Structure formats: structure tokens, C-alpha cells
Amino acid sequence: MRYLVTGGAGFIGSNYIHYLLEKYQDIKIINLDKLTYAGNLENLKDVENDSRYKFVKGDIGDVKLVDALVQQTDVLVNFAAESHVDRSIGTPDAFIKTDIFGTFVLLEACRKHGIQKFVQISTDEVYGSTLKGAFREDSPLMPSSPYSASKAGADRLAYSYHVTYNLPVIITRCSNNYGPNQYPEKLIPLFVTNALEGKNLPIYGAGKNVRDWIYVLDHCDAVDFVIHHGKDGEVYNIGGGNERTNLEITDIILKELDQPETLKVFVKDRPGHDLRYAVDCTKLKQMGWQPQYEFEKGMKLTIDWYTANQDWWKKIKSGEYLNYYRQQYQIS
Ligand code: NAD
Ligand code: TYD
């Protein structure tokens, strides 16, 4: 099977590539990644010489390049995106270009050349926030940040290519991932690395916002599951079943790293901050899939990884990686 994984140098994409290479012998993977600030080839250093794997630096919005790559592809899994809500509030343009237009370019190439499976990695954030209950796959979409709105656009565009052109599209909507290789701007890696450095942990608002957390390898496993057992045109919610407030997450990190409560600081809230995300995963459960990593175990693995790989995140936090890739790949 020939895979085109887009955004494979990022957090989830790099874990997914490792997952595939470990699980399948007879596989070819092309990783198409633009290497934005979030893309990091260090995440794939251990597999860069694997004959089953190839890296291509490029933009999913590049029609010519995507056209050529799709012709060598059976399964396309689209992870490539601008992914951070805070950045989407400050500079939404890149979100529209990559998350919506980039997905359109991928879909068009697949329409032209055919594909066995197109997996659009969407997000639970497309449903927006809810105080009670959990969103099902047929719940209305009410995205409320430029990030989630651009993801919702891509999600429905992918669906339209199934309905209109019969493209074999599957859409997944996963909750908040955590684990190794996550860029230290997101809650868990930021707080773990700050705590390791004895720096403050900036909690937005009152810290009462709730997210459902899933260990990244469970997400990878669920994507693999729907590729093999899912139905074209369907949406699948993926969740970890671990709802926690941001304060609870903060306390776990401080306790595990034996750091004082005084590192907690309450800062100005994020504009339009969604209070709670929750997905109902009955559909996937009834098909026979469920997450394997208990939250306590996943958090311990994650905290241990950032503790053992300080070189990885210190280079990112100091800007060293970005400068290196800027030179290497002439990124502006
Ligand atoms: P990430 O920011 O760590 O990685 C994104 C990757 O995409 C980077 O390697 C980046 O270089 C690449 N990229 C960005 N723009 C590109 C472009 N125009 N062309 C090619 N590559 C480009 O993100 P992540 O957390 O790994 O998320 C991956 C996907 O999963 C995203 O689509 C995101 O919306 C979705 N998702 C993430 C979460 C989460 O909790 N992180 C949850 C649900 C869904
Ligand atoms: P984040 O990791 O950015 O994911 P998302 O907003 O996509 O769910 O944030 C998770 C939660 O943590 C969210 O409620 C915002 C909050 N948060 C903080 O309180 N402080 C921070 O420094 C960050 C990055 C996030």
C-alpha cells in the first residue's frame, strides 16, 4: 500500500508514520510537509534511511507537486494544517490557505487521478463548545475560532467530494491529543517544559475549560482502524474518554514533576475561548475500536518523554531548529 501522509513532520503525523512503519512491512510512505514552524524532521530522524519512507518538502497548496505525488498514492491521510487556536486569532490567513485551500488542492488531485482512500483529519473543535452532553457525528457544526472554522470548511469540502464526485473520503474528528513530539505551544507540552525549567504555567481565565484528552498513539490507531473498517462518506468521532479541566491538567504536571503550586499564574483569557469539548464515540466503539492508553499512563509516558528529551524542546524554544530549517530549505 502506498501512503501519502501530509503534515507528517508535525506532532500527530510523525507519530502516525512511526505507527505505520512499525505495523506494516509492505508499505511505502511519502511524507509531504512544508516544514512550517511546527514541522520538525528530528521527529523522524530514526526512520529517515528506511527504504519504505521518503520525505518531500512542499506545500499541500502546490498543485503541480500534489498532482505528481497523488499519482503515486493509494491512501492519502491529510494531517497538514495550521493547528494552533491562539495563532489563528492573531494571524488567520495561513489557516485559510492551508486548512481550506490546501485541502481543496489535495481533493482536486484525487478527483483527477483517483484514490483508494482519502482521510481528512478533522477535529472535535468543529462542533464548538457545549456545557452538557457530547457531540455525535450528526450534531451541527458551530466552530468558533478561525482555526476550527477553517477545519470545518475542509471537513465539509471533503464530504462534498464524496457526495458529488464519489471520492472515497473518510473524515475523523478527534479530541485533544497529547504525547511525544508535540510542539511546546500547546497546553501539555508547554506546561511540562515550563515546569521542567521552573517557569510559570500561564492558565487562561479561571482554568475551568474542559478538554477530552487522548494519547496520540490511540489517535493513530483509530485512523488506521477507520481506513480498514470505516465506510466511505462517513464521519468518525475519536475520543479518549478523559475529560479534564485545565487546572486538573496543571495539577497533575506539577505533582508529577514535584514543582510548587506557586508556578501557576492566571492570565488574560483567550478571546472566544471554548469552554468544553466533548465527543460521543459510540459509533466507533460499536465497530470494535476503543482507546488503549489510560490517562494516567499516557501522562506519565508523556512527562517522562519531555523529561528525557530536553534537547528536542530546548532547541525549539530557543528558535534553533527554525533557524536551521530556514537555512536548509530556504524558508522565509
Ligand atoms: P502540528 O502543527 O504539530 O503539525 C502540522 C504539520 O503540518 C507540520 O509538520 C507543518 O509543517 C505541516 N504543514 C503546515 N502547513 C502545511 C502546508 N501548507 N503544506 C504541507 N505541510 C504543512 O499539528 P498536529 O497537532 O500534529 O495536528 C495534525 C492534524 O490533526 C491537524 O490537521 C489538526 O487539525 C488535527 N488535529 C489535531 C489535534 C491535536 O490535539 N493536536 C486534535 C484533533 C485533530
Ligand atoms: P491548546 O493546547 O491550545 O488546545 P485547544 O485550544 O485547541 O484545545 O489549549 C488547551 C486548553 O488549555 C485550552 O482551554 C486553552 C488552555 N491553555 C492555557 O490555559 N494556557 C496556555 O498557555 C495554553 C497554550 C492553553
Image (cartoon, rainbow, N blue to C red):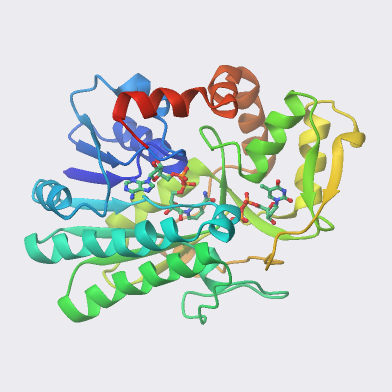
What residue is shown at x 92% (from left), y 35% (from top)? Answer: 262
Report x, y in % for residue 114. 10, 61
Task: Determine the residue located farthest toward the front in the rendered image.
Answer: 332
Report x, y in % for residue 8. 35, 40
Quadrant in the picture for the N terminus: top left
Report x, y in % for residue 154. 36, 67
What residue is shown at x 8% (from left), y 50% (from top)? Answer: 71
* Left or right of 172, for residue 247: right
Q: Can residue 12 be seen by looking at this rendering?
A: yes
The image shows a total of numbered marks equal to: 0
Up the image or down, 85 lies above or below 200; here it is: below
* Left or right of 160, for residue 100: right
* Left or right of 188, for residue 216: left
* Left or right of 27, for residue 217: right
Towards the viewer: 17 or 263 = 263
Report x, y in % for residue 83. 49, 52
What residue is shown at x 30% (from left), y 69% (from top)? Answer: 158
Q: Can residue 281 be seen by looking at this rendering?
A: no
Towards the viewer: 167 or 237 = 167
Question: Which quadrant would residue 191 be assigned to in this image?
Answer: top right
Quadrant in the picture for the C terminus: top left
What residue is shown at x 14% (from left), y 59% (from top)? Answer: 115
